[in-house]
Image (cartoon, helix red, strand yellow):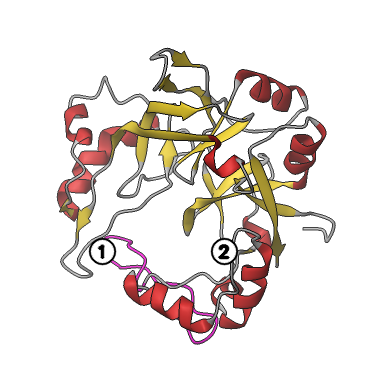
Amino acid sequence: MGSLLRFFEIRRDETGAELERYRISASHKWATPGVVCPDCGGWTSIGFQYPSVDLSALPNAPRFSDRAPVPIEVYEDLIAPILPLMPDRSIPCPGTEFGPVVGRLKGSTPSLCWSAGWTLLGNQTAIDALQQAGLRFPQPVPARIVSSLSREAVELFEFEIWPRGHLAPQSYERHRLRPMAQSRKSYAKAITEEHVREFAESRGMVLASGSSPPTACPICRAPRGRVFIYQLVLEAASVPPDTDIFRLTEAAPRIVVTDRFRVAVRDLELTGVVFDEVELV
Protein backbone atom coordinates (compact mmCIF):
# COMPACT_ATOMS: atom_id res chain seq x y z
CA MET A 1 0.00 0.00 0.00
CA GLY A 2 1.38 3.33 -1.00
CA SER A 3 1.23 6.38 1.17
CA LEU A 4 -0.79 8.25 -1.45
CA LEU A 5 -3.85 6.03 -0.99
CA ARG A 6 -6.62 7.78 0.92
CA PHE A 7 -9.87 6.39 2.31
CA PHE A 8 -12.91 8.06 3.81
CA GLU A 9 -15.90 7.09 5.89
CA ILE A 10 -19.08 8.09 4.08
CA ARG A 11 -22.08 9.11 6.17
CA ARG A 12 -25.29 11.10 5.99
CA ASP A 13 -25.06 14.86 5.69
CA GLU A 14 -26.63 16.07 8.93
CA THR A 15 -25.89 19.75 8.50
CA GLY A 16 -28.60 22.40 8.50
CA ALA A 17 -31.82 21.57 6.68
CA GLU A 18 -30.43 18.27 5.32
CA LEU A 19 -31.16 16.53 8.63
CA GLU A 20 -34.90 17.32 8.40
CA ARG A 21 -35.23 17.05 4.62
CA TYR A 22 -36.37 13.42 4.47
CA ARG A 23 -36.88 10.21 6.38
CA ILE A 24 -36.90 6.68 5.00
CA SER A 25 -38.47 4.02 7.22
CA ALA A 26 -37.62 0.68 5.66
CA SER A 27 -36.28 -2.82 6.23
CA HIS A 28 -35.14 -5.76 4.15
CA LYS A 29 -37.45 -8.63 3.31
CA TRP A 30 -35.47 -11.40 4.99
CA ALA A 31 -32.84 -11.71 7.71
CA THR A 32 -30.98 -14.46 9.50
CA PRO A 33 -32.03 -14.79 13.15
CA GLY A 34 -29.94 -14.08 16.18
CA VAL A 35 -28.03 -16.90 17.86
CA VAL A 36 -28.26 -18.42 21.33
CA CYS A 37 -24.83 -19.68 22.35
CA PRO A 38 -24.08 -21.94 25.36
CA ASP A 39 -20.67 -20.30 25.82
CA CYS A 40 -21.19 -16.53 25.39
CA GLY A 41 -24.97 -16.16 25.54
CA GLY A 42 -25.54 -15.28 21.90
CA TRP A 43 -25.56 -12.35 19.53
CA THR A 44 -26.87 -10.65 16.45
CA SER A 45 -25.51 -7.89 14.21
CA ILE A 46 -26.52 -4.90 12.10
CA GLY A 47 -25.21 -3.57 8.82
CA PHE A 48 -24.63 -6.77 6.86
CA GLN A 49 -26.95 -6.41 3.86
CA TYR A 50 -27.27 -8.26 0.54
CA PRO A 51 -30.23 -6.80 -1.38
CA SER A 52 -29.37 -8.82 -4.50
CA VAL A 53 -29.83 -12.15 -2.72
CA ASP A 54 -33.34 -13.58 -3.26
CA LEU A 55 -34.36 -16.21 -0.71
CA SER A 56 -37.89 -16.75 -2.06
CA ALA A 57 -37.01 -20.06 -3.77
CA LEU A 58 -35.55 -21.64 -0.64
CA PRO A 59 -37.77 -24.23 1.07
CA ASN A 60 -37.03 -22.65 4.46
CA ALA A 61 -37.56 -19.04 3.26
CA PRO A 62 -40.39 -18.36 5.79
CA ARG A 63 -37.92 -18.97 8.62
CA PHE A 64 -36.05 -15.81 7.62
CA SER A 65 -39.06 -13.63 8.39
CA ASP A 66 -38.67 -14.44 12.10
CA ARG A 67 -35.61 -12.86 13.73
CA ALA A 68 -36.06 -14.57 17.10
CA PRO A 69 -32.75 -16.10 18.30
CA VAL A 70 -32.14 -19.81 17.71
CA PRO A 71 -29.54 -22.26 19.08
CA ILE A 72 -26.23 -22.21 17.21
CA GLU A 73 -26.70 -25.72 15.79
CA VAL A 74 -30.12 -24.73 14.40
CA TYR A 75 -28.62 -21.57 12.93
CA GLU A 76 -25.91 -23.48 11.07
CA ASP A 77 -28.50 -25.78 9.47
CA LEU A 78 -30.74 -22.82 8.70
CA ILE A 79 -28.14 -20.85 6.72
CA ALA A 80 -26.75 -23.82 4.78
CA PRO A 81 -29.03 -23.22 1.73
CA ILE A 82 -27.96 -19.55 1.65
CA LEU A 83 -24.24 -20.22 1.30
CA PRO A 84 -24.30 -20.91 -2.48
CA LEU A 85 -26.19 -17.63 -2.97
CA MET A 86 -23.68 -15.37 -1.22
CA PRO A 87 -22.11 -13.10 -3.87
CA ASP A 88 -18.95 -12.56 -1.83
CA ARG A 89 -18.75 -16.21 -0.67
CA SER A 90 -18.97 -15.16 2.97
CA ILE A 91 -20.80 -16.98 5.75
CA PRO A 92 -23.77 -14.83 6.84
CA CYS A 93 -23.58 -13.88 10.48
CA PRO A 94 -26.66 -13.54 12.69
CA GLY A 95 -28.72 -10.50 11.66
CA THR A 96 -27.61 -10.47 8.01
CA GLU A 97 -30.34 -8.99 5.80
CA PHE A 98 -31.37 -10.08 2.31
CA GLY A 99 -33.63 -8.96 -0.51
CA PRO A 100 -34.78 -5.49 -1.49
CA VAL A 101 -35.29 -2.82 1.12
CA VAL A 102 -39.01 -2.10 1.52
CA GLY A 103 -40.57 0.95 3.14
CA ARG A 104 -41.81 4.52 2.98
CA LEU A 105 -40.30 7.92 2.27
CA LYS A 106 -41.34 11.14 3.94
CA GLY A 107 -39.97 14.27 2.28
CA SER A 108 -37.67 14.52 -0.73
CA THR A 109 -34.31 12.80 -1.03
CA PRO A 110 -30.98 14.23 -2.18
CA SER A 111 -28.85 12.43 -4.80
CA LEU A 112 -27.61 9.92 -2.21
CA CYS A 113 -29.75 9.09 0.80
CA TRP A 114 -30.00 6.76 3.76
CA SER A 115 -32.36 4.40 5.51
CA ALA A 116 -31.27 4.16 9.14
CA GLY A 117 -27.61 5.15 9.22
CA TRP A 118 -26.09 2.31 7.25
CA THR A 119 -28.27 1.59 4.19
CA LEU A 120 -27.05 3.79 1.32
CA LEU A 121 -29.34 4.49 -1.62
CA GLY A 122 -29.15 6.68 -4.70
CA ASN A 123 -31.43 7.94 -7.43
CA GLN A 124 -31.03 6.78 -11.02
CA THR A 125 -29.11 9.89 -12.04
CA ALA A 126 -26.58 9.47 -9.25
CA ILE A 127 -26.07 5.77 -9.90
CA ASP A 128 -25.59 6.29 -13.64
CA ALA A 129 -23.15 9.15 -13.07
CA LEU A 130 -21.00 7.18 -10.63
CA GLN A 131 -20.87 4.17 -12.94
CA GLN A 132 -20.01 6.33 -15.94
CA ALA A 133 -17.21 7.87 -13.88
CA GLY A 134 -15.68 4.39 -13.70
CA LEU A 135 -16.29 3.69 -10.01
CA ARG A 136 -16.29 0.03 -9.04
CA PHE A 137 -19.09 -1.43 -6.92
CA PRO A 138 -21.68 -4.23 -7.22
CA GLN A 139 -24.74 -3.39 -9.28
CA PRO A 140 -27.19 -1.41 -7.08
CA VAL A 141 -30.55 -3.08 -6.48
CA PRO A 142 -33.94 -1.38 -7.00
CA ALA A 143 -35.50 -0.48 -3.66
CA ARG A 144 -39.22 -0.79 -2.97
CA ILE A 145 -39.88 2.61 -1.46
CA VAL A 146 -43.16 4.49 -1.75
CA SER A 147 -43.95 8.09 -0.91
CA SER A 148 -45.95 8.51 2.29
CA LEU A 149 -47.71 11.47 0.67
CA SER A 150 -48.55 10.28 -2.85
CA ARG A 151 -48.37 6.50 -2.22
CA GLU A 152 -46.45 6.26 -5.47
CA ALA A 153 -43.20 4.35 -5.96
CA VAL A 154 -39.97 6.32 -5.54
CA GLU A 155 -37.14 5.38 -7.89
CA LEU A 156 -34.24 4.59 -5.58
CA PHE A 157 -31.48 1.99 -5.73
CA GLU A 158 -29.65 0.40 -2.83
CA PHE A 159 -25.89 0.02 -2.94
CA GLU A 160 -24.83 -3.54 -2.14
CA ILE A 161 -21.77 -3.01 0.02
CA TRP A 162 -19.77 -6.04 1.09
CA PRO A 163 -17.75 -6.32 4.32
CA ARG A 164 -14.13 -6.34 3.15
CA GLY A 165 -11.90 -4.06 5.23
CA HIS A 166 -10.66 -4.62 8.77
CA LEU A 167 -10.07 -2.25 11.67
CA ALA A 168 -6.50 -1.96 12.90
CA PRO A 169 -5.82 -2.47 16.64
CA GLN A 170 -5.20 1.29 16.96
CA SER A 171 -8.96 1.86 16.51
CA TYR A 172 -9.48 0.81 20.12
CA GLU A 173 -6.88 3.09 21.73
CA ARG A 174 -8.31 5.61 24.18
CA HIS A 175 -5.97 8.45 23.22
CA ARG A 176 -7.79 8.62 19.87
CA LEU A 177 -10.97 9.90 21.53
CA ARG A 178 -10.30 13.59 20.81
CA PRO A 179 -9.49 13.25 17.08
CA MET A 180 -12.68 11.28 16.56
CA ALA A 181 -14.78 13.93 18.27
CA GLN A 182 -13.21 16.74 16.28
CA SER A 183 -13.68 14.96 12.95
CA ARG A 184 -17.47 15.05 13.18
CA LYS A 185 -19.03 18.50 13.05
CA SER A 186 -22.37 17.07 14.13
CA TYR A 187 -21.00 16.62 17.65
CA ALA A 188 -22.39 19.67 19.46
CA LYS A 189 -19.94 19.33 22.34
CA ALA A 190 -16.56 17.81 22.91
CA ILE A 191 -16.77 14.15 23.87
CA THR A 192 -15.08 13.44 27.17
CA GLU A 193 -13.94 10.18 28.72
CA GLU A 194 -16.94 10.39 31.05
CA HIS A 195 -19.36 10.63 28.12
CA VAL A 196 -17.76 7.60 26.50
CA ARG A 197 -17.88 5.60 29.72
CA GLU A 198 -21.58 6.33 30.22
CA PHE A 199 -22.34 5.44 26.60
CA ALA A 200 -20.33 2.21 26.77
CA GLU A 201 -21.79 1.06 30.06
CA SER A 202 -25.35 1.64 28.83
CA ARG A 203 -24.65 -0.73 25.93
CA GLY A 204 -22.53 -3.33 27.65
CA MET A 205 -19.31 -2.27 25.94
CA VAL A 206 -15.79 -2.63 27.29
CA LEU A 207 -13.38 0.30 27.32
CA ALA A 208 -10.03 -1.16 26.32
CA SER A 209 -6.93 -0.10 28.23
CA GLY A 210 -4.74 -0.25 25.13
CA SER A 211 -4.82 -1.78 21.66
CA SER A 212 -7.41 -4.45 22.48
CA PRO A 213 -9.57 -5.58 19.59
CA PRO A 214 -12.45 -7.87 20.58
CA THR A 215 -11.81 -11.60 20.56
CA ALA A 216 -14.27 -14.09 19.09
CA CYS A 217 -16.33 -16.77 20.80
CA PRO A 218 -14.92 -20.17 19.73
CA ILE A 219 -18.42 -21.61 19.30
CA CYS A 220 -20.52 -18.97 17.56
CA ARG A 221 -17.83 -16.46 16.41
CA ALA A 222 -19.51 -13.63 18.33
CA PRO A 223 -17.17 -10.71 19.15
CA ARG A 224 -16.56 -10.83 22.89
CA GLY A 225 -16.78 -7.71 24.98
CA ARG A 226 -18.19 -5.22 22.42
CA VAL A 227 -15.06 -3.11 22.65
CA PHE A 228 -15.57 0.63 22.07
CA ILE A 229 -14.16 1.97 18.79
CA TYR A 230 -12.58 5.36 19.41
CA GLN A 231 -11.59 6.12 15.82
CA LEU A 232 -11.64 4.26 12.53
CA VAL A 233 -8.11 3.15 11.66
CA LEU A 234 -8.01 0.91 8.61
CA GLU A 235 -5.65 -2.05 8.28
CA ALA A 236 -3.86 -1.42 4.99
CA ALA A 237 -3.43 -5.10 4.14
CA SER A 238 -7.21 -5.61 4.29
CA VAL A 239 -8.13 -2.92 1.77
CA PRO A 240 -9.91 -4.56 -1.21
CA PRO A 241 -8.23 -3.68 -4.52
CA ASP A 242 -11.32 -4.19 -6.70
CA THR A 243 -14.01 -1.91 -5.25
CA ASP A 244 -14.44 1.76 -4.35
CA ILE A 245 -16.85 1.17 -1.46
CA PHE A 246 -16.92 -1.43 1.32
CA ARG A 247 -18.05 -2.09 4.87
CA LEU A 248 -15.81 -2.75 7.84
CA THR A 249 -15.99 -6.38 8.92
CA GLU A 250 -15.83 -5.50 12.63
CA ALA A 251 -18.25 -2.57 12.30
CA ALA A 252 -20.57 -3.26 9.36
CA PRO A 253 -22.68 -0.08 9.75
CA ARG A 254 -19.54 1.95 8.98
CA ILE A 255 -18.92 2.37 5.23
CA VAL A 256 -15.56 3.31 3.72
CA VAL A 257 -14.91 4.65 0.22
CA THR A 258 -11.82 5.39 -1.83
CA ASP A 259 -10.67 8.88 -2.63
CA ARG A 260 -11.83 8.21 -6.21
CA PHE A 261 -15.38 7.81 -4.90
CA ARG A 262 -15.17 10.98 -2.81
CA VAL A 263 -13.79 13.03 -5.70
CA ALA A 264 -16.46 11.70 -8.08
CA VAL A 265 -19.24 12.68 -5.66
CA ARG A 266 -17.72 16.16 -5.35
CA ASP A 267 -17.16 16.67 -9.06
CA LEU A 268 -20.61 15.35 -9.98
CA GLU A 269 -22.13 17.64 -7.33
CA LEU A 270 -24.04 14.78 -5.72
CA THR A 271 -25.68 15.65 -2.42
CA GLY A 272 -26.70 13.92 0.80
CA VAL A 273 -23.35 12.62 2.06
CA VAL A 274 -20.20 13.87 3.78
CA PHE A 275 -16.80 12.27 4.25
CA ASP A 276 -14.33 11.85 7.13
CA GLU A 277 -10.83 10.70 6.27
CA VAL A 278 -9.82 7.35 7.73
CA GLU A 279 -6.26 6.67 8.85
CA LEU A 280 -4.46 3.82 7.09
CA VAL A 281 -1.77 1.76 8.87
Name which residue type carries label 1: Ile
Point 21% across, 33% down: residue? 65
Left or right, 267 with reference to 142: right
Q: From the image, which quarter does the N terminus lie in?
A: bottom right
Query: Does residue 85 appear in this view?
Result: yes
Residue 192 highlighted magenta (yes or no): no
Residue 167: which disc?
Answer: 2
Q: Which residue is mark 1?
A: 219
Given the image, on which type of amino acid does mark 2 rest?
Leu
Q: Locate residue 200 relative to residue 243 in the image: left or right.
A: left
Residue lying at 26% horizontally and 19% vertically, measured from the top left = 57
Marks 1 and 2: in contact by CB < 8 Å?
no
Q: Position of residue 229 (x, y in %)?
A: 51, 69
At mark 1, the secondary structure is loop
> Bounds of the magenta span?
206-225
Distance CA(mark 2)–CA(mark 1): 22 Å
* Most common secondary structure along the magenta stretch: loop
